[in-house]
Image (tube, grey):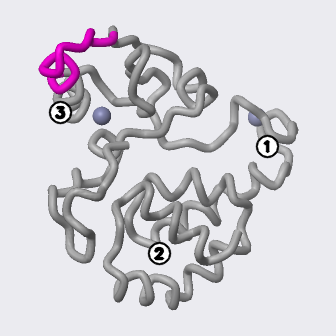
Amino acid sequence: MDAERLLTLWQSAHGTLRSDWRESFLRRPEVEQLCRLPEPAVLAALSRSRKLARIAEIAADEAWWFEGKPCEEDALSWCARCKPHPYPSVVVITMGWGDAFHKSEDCLWLVKGQHAVSARGGEVAPVQRVNIQVALGSGKLPCLWCFSPKPPPPERKGVVPGSARLL
Ligand SMILES: [Zn+2]
Ligand SMILES: [Zn+2]
């Protein structure tokens, strides 16, 4: 992965940065460190924090699994049971729309999304509780509202308002 790709991925998770912030992002020492780690480990860490230092810490901790090193408990490479992730074993997804999984049915973004669908006259997709492996396996991404250490306020420093995706 190169620095530009890392920036693109960061922005798709956390919102578009102003151009002067993009430049200082690319100069951060963690960027070089993250570019050397396996991309799936970086992707897995990116959604869990906005802070590059924290992302680098998480990705470095979990890189062993993505590099195919055997786990301690089962001595297996890419062991499904030991794959590192910070999520509960059961999560909530919507059938039919949305690319996110949630901690609970009460997630504000999930509820808002469903209200928006019905306000447009659409049919609200049913909500389902699934095993985390099902959600991760189907390519769903963690909802930032549910899984951020602090829910991001609507307008964040350096982020262009209205551009952050609801993951
Ligand atoms: Zn294992
Ligand atoms: Zn959520």
Q: Give the quarter of the figure containing the C terminus.
A: top left
**Residue 124 drawn in magenta:** yes
Residue extending furthest toward the front? 121
* Kind of residue sitting beneath label 3: Leu
Closest to the observer: 60 or 127? 127
Mark 1 and mark 3: span between their CA atoms? 37 Å
Q: Earlier in the sequence, mark 1 or mark 2?
A: 2
**Given the image, on which type of amino acid does mark 1 rest?**
Cys
Q: Name the residue under label 3.
A: 108
Q: Is residue 105 above or below residue 13?
A: above
Q: Quadrant of ligand 2?
A: top left
- Please provide percent x and percent y for residue 101: 41, 30
Determine whether the residue tagged by mark 3 lies in a helix, strand or loop.
Answer: helix
Say above or below: 162 vs 6. Answer: above
Magenta segment boundaries in residue numbering: 115-125
Residue drawn where x is 55% and y is 61% of the image? 58
Q: Residue at x 45, y 32 (%)?
A: 99
145 with respect to 62 (left or right):
left
Task: Tell which tag, 1 or 2, sits nearer the viewer.
Answer: 2
Q: In this view, does 61 lie above or below 147?
A: below
Which residue shows up at 63% across the image and 61% down it? 61
Report which residue position mark 2 lands on. Answer: 53
